[in-house]
Image (spheres, rainbow, N blue to C red):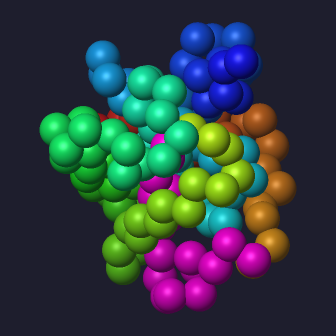
Amino acid sequence: MATIFSRIIAGEIPCYKVAENEKFFAFLDINPLVKGHTLVIPKQEVDYIFDLTDEDLAEMHVFAKRIATAIKKAFPCKKVGEAVIGLEVPHAHIHLIPIRQESDMLFSNPKLKLSDEEFRSIAQAINSSL
């Protein structure tokens, strides 16, 4: 059975796509901690990020770096934080979160409730900054 992320990549479940290439896919987290919270995933279905080959792990981080740079342009912040937890969905993923302070990265914080229009605008802003 395909993970929810594989179904998103396949277009079976809608998402707010930011970018993709032949190996990786970036889209907005639908339960964001802050505006610009983006997920980067491999198209290959792998549960644990450290089960990726060294080459794929390195390429995934280079792809994530491009997305993080675009997030920082679109949503001015001190840095773009990176988190890999991997317990919610059994498909490797990196959270990229624009942060002003460390507490912006607390996953126990209340999630933002954004409209479809806001999500579209955020995805477009990041994509335009690539």
| Outermost residue to the front | 51
Q: Is residue 78 magenta?
A: no
The quarter of the picture where residue 60 lies is: top left
- Location of the C terminus by quadrant is top left
The correct choice, above or below, for 70 with respect to 17 in the image is below
Q: Residue at x 33, y 40 (%)?
A: 52
The correct choice, above or below, for 49 with respect to 1 in the image is below
Q: Residue at x 56, y 76 (%)?
A: 105
Q: Residue at x 67, y 27 (%)?
A: 3
The correct choice, above or below, for 31 with respect to 89 in the image is below
In the foreground, 97 or 126: 97
Q: Is residue 93 magenta?
A: yes
Q: From the viewer's perspective, tell me whether residue 34 is left or right of residue 97.
A: right
Q: Position of residue 67 (x, y in %)?
A: 34, 46
Number of labels in the image equals 0
The correct choice, above or below, for 104 with respect to 69 in the image is below
Q: From the viewer's perspective, tell me whether residue 114 is left or right of residue 104.
A: right
Q: Position of residue 102 (x, y in %)?
A: 50, 87
Residue 41 appears in the rendering: yes
- Range drawn in magenta: 92-108
Q: From the viewer's perspective, tell me whether residue 110 is left or right of residue 105.
A: right
- Location of the N terminus by quadrant is top right
Residue 129 appears in the rendering: no
In the foreground, 103 or 85: 85
Q: Position of residue 15 (x, y in %)?
A: 65, 28
